[in-house]
Image (spheres, grey):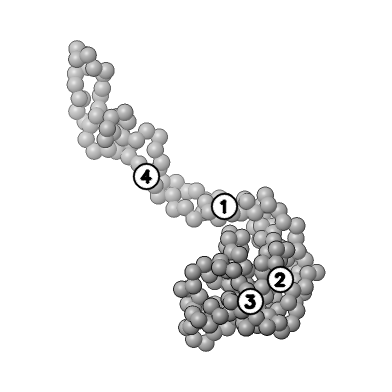
Amino acid sequence: MPNMKVVDMAGKEVGEIALSEKVFAREVNEAVLHTAVRAYLMNQRQGTQSTLTRSEVSGGGKKPWKQKGTGHARQGSTRSPQWTHGGIALGPKPRSYRVSLTKGQKRAALFSALSSKVAGNEMVVIDAITATEYKTKAMVDMLGAVGAAKKALIVLPEVNEYVIKSCANIEGVKTTQWNTINVYDILNCDTLIVAKDAVAKIEEVYAR
């Protein structure tokens, strides 16, 4: 069972926490991570792109010239795909890009992502991440005190508007809650900052 030191918002060590091996010390499965990240990115697509086929382009109802005797190749419409301003052949149409993962894949990917951060010393556990006013400087000072890299993900045990809005204007910093955390955000950050209570809630759900 891996142990990790717990610090306060000033970066001072205040204790130690034993992390669940099932969640934070798994062998990293790169294949399932790739699948999860691909699914996340595909599911962000709106799929609203659309082109006009020859039947949808305005005009082209009149035959451009008679069938025979002109020396030209026969044409029935100026909106055929080979014409300028003609319709698009085999162009994209609105569709769903949604990719689904099984429950096992989702969990395996989450465990692998968290374990990779622990193994790479890219995870910090803070005793409590709190704020009682909207103050960006307080969050900047906290990030500096715990040695966070430029891209950081802060995981909270519950919604705290003061913390969320105080971090909103810090470039490269994102906040989320323990129950909305996703594999892409974990892998995309350089430092994963997790509140101690958030760790407890993650383990309560996933370490059973």
Tell me if residue 175 can be seen: yes
Instruction: Provide the residue designation for mark 1.
Output: 39
From the viewer's perspective, is 56 left or right of 116? left
Q: Earlier in the sequence, mark 3 or mark 4?
A: 4
Which one is nearer the viewer's eye here, 88 or 130? 130
Which one is nearer the viewer's eye here, 142 or 22? 142
The residue type indicated by label 2 comes to Glu
Instruction: Provide the residue designation for mark 3.
Output: 146
Q: Secondary structure at mark 3?
A: loop
Q: How packed is label 4: few (under 14 Cα within 10 Å), some, or many (20 or more)?
A: few
The residue type indicated by label 1 comes to Ala
Instruction: Provide the residue designation for mark 2.
Output: 203
Give the image quarter of residue 77.
top left
| Screen quadrant of the N terminus | bottom right
**Residue 149 picture location, percent across and down:** 59, 68
Do the residues under discs 3 and 4 have CB atoms within 8 angstroms? no
Do the residues under discs 2 and 3 have CB atoms within 8 angstroms? no
Q: How packed is label 1: few (under 14 Cα within 10 Å), some, or many (20 or more)?
A: some
The residue type indicated by label 4 comes to Ser
Query: Nearer the viewer's eye, disc 1 or disc 3?
Result: 3
Could you tell me which residue is drawn at 21 percent across and 31 percent down?
61
**Residue 191 picture location, percent across and down:** 62, 68
Q: Earlier in the sequence, mark 1 or mark 2?
A: 1
Q: Secondary structure at mark 4?
A: loop
Query: Nearer the viewer's eye, disc 3 or disc 4?
Result: 3
Could you tell me which residue is drawn at 74 percent across and 74 percent down?
4
